[in-house]
Amino acid sequence: MKRELLQLSIAYVGLLGLVALTTGSAFVGLGPFNVVLNLGIAVAKAALVYWFFMELRRADGLVHLAALSVIFWLLVLLGAHAAAWLTRMPLSVP
């Protein structure tokens, strides 16, 4: 019980650190790299929540398969959205 509380506390402090990093990156002018940085931080936060707070580390194989399918379909939807956005013609203003 004590070890689990320590692990959750470390994960919580890690999440707070990532939130502080996200907030700090808003004040740094990184240009287009800022989006990439913030998406990477968001993925790290989601991974911490999945692994520690949703206890994915103790789950059986079927739950791992469900989590991987969620990630797969999210990537499919993001890819379809990016393809639709990148192939649109710019509208000309009359």
Image (spheres, grey):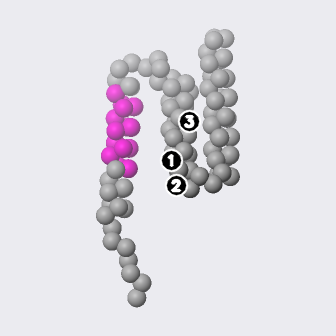
Q: Secondary structure at mark 1?
A: helix
Structural distance between the alpha carbons of marks 2 and 3: 21 Å
- The residue labelled by disc 1 is 36
Above or below 75: residue 57: above
Q: Secondary structure at mark 3?
A: helix
The residue tagged 3 is 45
Query: Which one is nearer the viewer's eye here, 5 or 83?
Result: 83
**Residues rendered magenta in the picture:** 65-78
Callout 2–callout 3 Cβ contact below 8 Å: no
Taking the image as shown, residue 85 lies to the left or right of residue 47, namely left
Give the prevailing secondary structure in the magenta stretch: helix
Q: Point out residue 84 in the picture as x, y percentages from the top left corner.
A: 33, 60
Residue type of the residue flagged with mark 3: Lys
Mark closest to the chain's N terminus, 2 or 3: 2
**Which residue is painted at 36% across and 44% down in the image?**
75
Residue 69 in view (yes/no): yes
Give residue 68's position: percent from left, percent from top: 36, 32
Q: Amino acid at mark 2?
A: Pro
Q: Could you tell me the amino acid type at mark 1? A: Val
Q: Nearer the viewer, mark 3 or mark 1?
A: 1
Categorize mark 1 by other alpha carbons within 10 Å: few (<14), some (14-19), many (20+).
few
- Numbered mark located on residue 32 in the image: 2
Residue 45 included in the magenta stretch of the image: no
Front label number (2 vs 3): 2
Residue shown at the point (63%, 54%) measured from the top left: 29
Q: In the figure, is residue 57 to the left or right of 66?
A: right
Task: Work out whether mark 3 precedes mark 1 in sequence or the reverse, and give the earlier one.
Answer: 1
Residue 92 vs residue 74, the one in the foreground: 92
Name the image quarter holding residue 67.
Answer: top left
Distance, label 2 to label 1, CA atoms, is: 7 Å
Distance from disc 3 to disc 1, alpha carbons, whole Å, reads: 14 Å
SS class, disc 2? loop
